[in-house]
Amino acid sequence: MLETEQEGDPHAKYLNEITETCTAQAELVIKTLEAGKIPLTLGGDHSIAAGTVSGVAEFYRRRNQRIGLLWIDAHSDINTPETSPSGNVHGMPLGAIMGLFSSPLSDMYGFSPKVRPENCALVGIRDVDEHERANIRRSGVHVFTMRDIDERGMRAVMEEALRLVGRGTVGYHVSLDLDWIDPEDAPGVGTPVWGGATYREAHLAMEIIADHGRMLSFELVEVNPVLDERNQTAELAVELALSAFGKKIL
């Protein structure tokens, strides 16, 4: 795409193409849910989440139900075209989901936000742009940083996050960016940040999600095989998906 398409608005590069892809993704998610199955999305960068969440939210909106959102990531991805320092839309999907800016990406299916802020929780963030801090406060979402995990432990953080995203909802979508995990265990990501979750912490988080049994949809993004080492990140991604869907040690 970069070689053949015009980037368009420098504050939201390739927004039209990304919106087209996300719209198609949303329709696939709806069809999967209509078939009685749990969607499993394997993305490139995290911009695809705007489509995935829109599809899940619209499916349940048609049934007069609302969903929660568990966003597990090193980054908050809650920029807008006005606040983004790079203009890269993969730093804006949560901003679009929460309705912080108006565009075809955020306005899919004619409603916004896709998830109520009190039912959205970010877990494990540790690399936040200056303006994103203001956007987080403006949005009203719940945030658990890596310091919270360090001080309280993964179980306490996950239990509280799941309680928040599950309160008054039919269940929740889980959006997992592999750069949430420390680069020592997951080197094959586009924007690695040191100080992330360990291999076992990541599995514990997924196992707790499975124990609760209220996951409606699962998304896994940012596995970059070009940057990976001996397929380490890709294999971990598969393991984590299995844990989220209920695989246990015993």
Image (cartoon, rainbow, N blue to C red):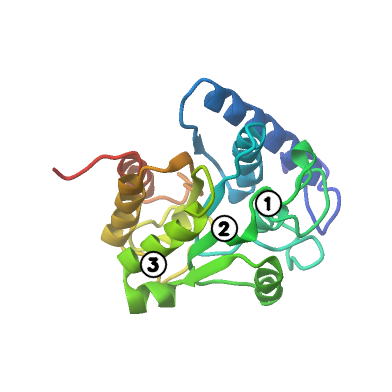
Which residue is denoted by mark 2 in the rendering? 120
Query: Looking at the image, is mark 1 or mark 3 earlier in the sequence?
Result: 1
Q: State the SS at label 3.
A: helix
Write down the residue under mark 3: 157
Q: CA distance from mark 2 to mark 3?
A: 14 Å
Residue drawn at (56%, 64%) of the image: 75
Q: Mark 2 or mark 1: which comes first in sequence? A: 1
For residue 70, above or below residue 213: below
Quarter of the image for the C terminus: give it: top left
Given contact means CB atoms under 8 Å apart, are the residues at marks 2 and 1 in contact? yes
Residue placed farthest to the left in the image?
250
Q: Position of residue 12 (x, y in %)?
A: 79, 54
| Residue 3: image location, x then y, percent | 74, 41
Tell me if 195 is positioned left or right of 129 in this view: left
Along the polypeptide, which appears first: circle 2 or circle 3? 2
Residue most toward the right? 9
- In x, y percent, where is residue 59? 62, 32
Q: Position of residue 68 (x, y in %)?
A: 55, 50
Foreground residue, 85 or 128?
128
Q: Amino acid at mark 1?
A: Ile
Q: Which of the pair 157/225 is nearer the observer? A: 157
Mark 1, residue position? 97
- Left/right placement of residue 72 relative to residue 186 reads right
- Point out the frontmost of discs 2 and 1: 2
Label 1 secondary element: helix
Crowd rating for badge 2 (residues with CA inside 10 Å; few <14, some 14–19, many 20+): many
Checking the image for residue 48, the label placed there is none
Tag 2 secondary structure:
strand
Instruction: Residue lying at the far top in this picture: please name it.
Output: 35
Answer left or right for 102 relative to 165. right
Residue at the image position 68 percent from the left and 47 percent from the top: 114
**In 3D space, how far apart are the residues under numbered discs 2 and 1 (Cα atoms)?**
10 Å
